[in-house]
Amino acid sequence: QVQLVESGGGSVQAGGSLRLSCTASGYTVSRYSMGWFRQAPGKEREGVAAIYRDGSPIYADSVKGRFTFSQDNAKNTLYLQMNMLKPEDTAMYYCAAATGALPFRVWAFLADAYNAWGQGTQVTVSS
């Protein structure tokens, strides 16, 4: 059974940094496509970063240059390093796994394309 557990969320001031972690069990992360999503109150869940089966990550324009998606295959863990945080980054952050095939960029940021989700970790950025 696939399980994903996020951690690392918290409250920071604008301009600060956080690193989120997502530890997977029941499968090997490098064999799946993985994504980081976020959802603010009253808004739809949006993709912020994704990677196709241990390939190169892609980023939403809103976080490009500020967020970095990485993974440690030995630990079966994903990371989302978030720098220069802004109040608009405030949201619940989720990691997710998908078994879809190419073309990845077509569905990478579509929440419905992902099969398994973590419980989320809250990020709050104050101005």
Image (cartoon, rainbow, N blue to C red):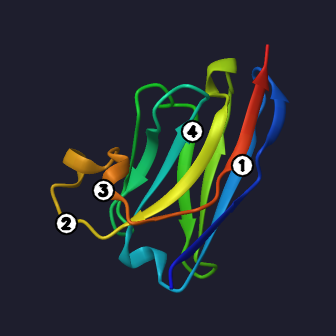
**Residue appearing at x 76%, y 31% in the figure:** 124
Residue identified by numbered label 2: 101
Contact flag, marks 3 and 4 (Cβ < 8 Å): no
Q: Are marks 2 and 4 in contact (CB under 8 Å)?
A: no
Mark whose residue sits in front, 2 or 4 = 2
User: Label 1: which residue?
Assistant: 19
Disc on res. 67: 4
Mark positioned earlier in the residue sequence (3 or 4): 4
Instruction: Name, please, the residue furthest toward the front.
Output: 42
Q: Which amino acid does the dot numbered 4 rest on?
A: Phe
**Badge 2 local density, few (<14 within 10 Å), some, or many (20+)?**
few
Query: Label 2 amino acid?
Result: Ala
With 126 as the anchor, is 61 left or right in this view?
left
Left or right for 69, reference 106:
right
Circles 1 and 2 in contact, beta carbons < 8 Å: no
For residue 61, what is the image quadrant?
top left
Q: Earlier in the sequence, mark 1 or mark 2?
A: 1
